[in-house]
Amino acid sequence: MLVAGCGGGGGTTATANSGIDGLALTGPTCPVENVSSPCPPRPIAAPIEVSLAGGSSGQQIQSDSSGRFSIVLPPGEYTVRPLAITNQAFPAPGPAQTVTVVAGQFVQVTVTYDTGIR
C-alpha cells in the first residue's frame, strides 16, 4: 500500500491520522452477468491523482495489485481522479470524485475503470 503526503495549503501539515484509503476496481469483467455466473469488478493497479478540490493539479499515487491505495492528508476537500494507464485505451478511467477528509479519520473511496466489455 502506498502512503504519501500531499500539501494542503493554508499552513496545515499532514498528520498520520487523516487522509484517504481507497480501492481501484475495473469492470465489467465479462460480457454477460447473471445470478449463477456473477462477474464482480476486479482490483487494478493504476495511477490516481489526488488534489485539493478546485485545484488544477495534485499528487499522483499508484494503487497496488490488490487495488489498494492510501494517502495521508490534512483535513479538507479533495478531488480523487483515476488516470489513464500508459499506452492503453482500456481500461478507461472513471469519473473523478470529491471527498472530504476529516481530522482523525481516513475517508474510504472507490475509483473505477471501465473495461469496455459490453
Image (cartoon, helix red, strand yellow):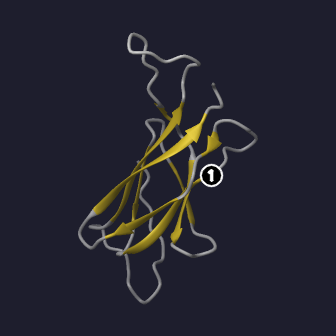
User: Residue at horizontal 66%, vertical 44%?
Assistant: 85
Give the x, y percent position of residue 62: 53, 50
User: Which quadrant would residue 38 be assigned to in this image?
Assistant: top left
Give the x, y percent position of residue 111: 49, 48
User: Residue at horizontal 43%, vertical 12%?
Assistant: 37
| On-image quarter of the C terminus | top right
Residue 94 vs 89, above or below: the answer is below
Q: Give 4 or 19, whichever is nearer the viewer.
A: 19
Residue at the disc numbered 1: 83
User: Residue at horizontal 53%, vertical 69%?
Assistant: 51
Give the x, y percent position of residue 54: 56, 75
Q: Give 67 or 30, whichever is nearer the viewer.
A: 30
Outermost residue toward the front in this view? 34
Disc 1 marks a residue whose amino acid type is Leu
Number of callouts: 1
For the residue labelled by badge 1, is the local secondary structure a helix, a strand or a loop? loop
Residue 116 vs 37, above or below: the answer is below
Q: Give 54 or 50, whichever is nearer the viewer.
A: 54
Whether residue 47 sits left or right of residue 15 in the image: it is right
